[in-house]
Image (tube, grey):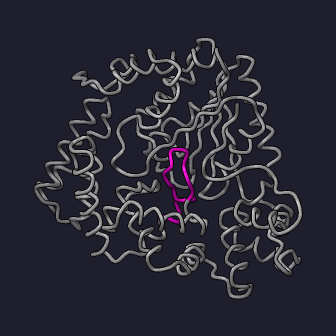
Amino acid sequence: MSSVHPNGGSGNVSGQGSEASAQAVRHPPFVGRGTQLGALKSAVEAAEIGESVLVLLAGEPGIGKTRIIGELASRTSVKTLWAACWEGEGAPAYWPWRQVVRSIGANDEQVLAEATALLDQPNPAEPGAGSRFPLFDAVAGGLANASVVQPLMLVLEDLHWADDGTIKLLQFLARDTRPRRLAIIGTYRDTDLDPAHPLSVGLAELVRDGLHISLGGLGPRDVATLVSSVGGEGSEETGAVARLHRQSGGNPFFLWQLLQLERSDGAREGTPPSIRAVVSRRLDRLPGVTRGTLAAASILGTDVDLALVASLIKHSGTAALTVLTAAESAGLISRTPDGGFVFVHALVREVLYAGLDITVRAAWHRRAAAALEVRYGDARPAEVAHHLFEAALGEPDERCLSYAVRAAERSWEVHGYDEAGHWYARALQALRPG
């Protein structure tokens, strides 16, 4: 049983006629990457026979890290588990591992209960390997047991947003020696790593214990294949392919945005060199209510929470769903398995967020904090604190201080020592603004 990531289909586009063409426009074909895909497939096959496998897949935003893993998942019988790190401040410690625990816990209630208890219980111990060991051991044991029953491919996306505990647990798993049939594949943006980030610090050890693959831009031949799949008049001409390759740098996401733009308005000359401008032009074609709703959603992060978006724009859930469905049809967001939505790429969300007037942005952050309080009470203090600080525009108030302290205390309770330190620092900032 394989699993395909919700951000789009995988596999080559084939067939003739308008239906195949429409499918090609919505989901670009998988092209190139033969060497990298072969290495990934060999790694998964090694895991199936009991070898310890860790793969780190690196590349810039939009280069196709998620897509190649989706293609891999469609070509293997191994069960795939997906988990992702969160880009904002509001995520609890070990957020991707919490997702993993829920996945394996669906078939192992004991693992679910034990790991969840360890993740959530208050722990007064000083931070360190010893205090984290029971949690690490429980997660490693649960994955080992699950993989013995059925081989697993565990995908951890966006490790450049991971907290320190998440990386340390990954290091623990890389060295774990108990029998298992598990391939762990982590993705990260090598362009977004600060030298002090936990992944940067632990990268040498992880690479030593596993396989490292870097994805670069597609070559001219692969770009030509992708361009020809659109089928636009003259799009596969040598000059057009060369220009598109030059503008996109072979980045599949950037290339596809350029192709969508050209297909919709025929503007083959004077295409903006900045991909941000390309995305902005696509957004400009949306009805005002659709773009406004997506802009509101950008306040919340890459995941689009329907209920929270409805609260932000002061519409009913049904009305918000109608607008988001239109945005899905425009190819800017996609459905998730649980019925929600997610931006097709973080860059779309970033363009929307950057385009907001600073006072409008602050007002929506205030609304987001209020909506989170109403919906979740005190269950998500870090998310509320994040929105309150963003709304404060550099002048944090007593509510910022209160929620920063709550977020710090909650993080400490669940072993998120680095996050606790971060929020205590924000609390000090609220005490001494400026």
Residue 140, horizontal then vertical, whole percent: 51, 19
**Residue 407, quarter of picture:** top left
- Residue at (38, 75) in percent of width and height: 356
427 over 417 or under it: above or below = below
Per the rendered image, the range of residues in magenta is 334-349
Q: In the displayed structure, would residue 307 be above or below residue 144?
A: below
**Frontmost residue, 297 versus 129:** 297
Residue plotted at (23% across, 68% down): 393
> Does 119 sit left or right of 193 as displayed?
left
User: Relative to residue 417, is residue 21 drawn left or right?
Assistant: right
- In the foreground, 111 or 169: 111
Task: Name above or below for residue 339 compared with residue 300.
Answer: above
Q: Quadrant of the C terminus?
A: bottom left
Residue situated in front as seen by the camera: 26 or 391: 26
Position of residue 361 relative to residue 113, above or below, is: below
Q: Residue furthest top?
A: 178
Q: Residue 259: x and y, percent?
A: 72, 73
- Quadrant housing the N terminus: top right
Magenta residue check for 201: no
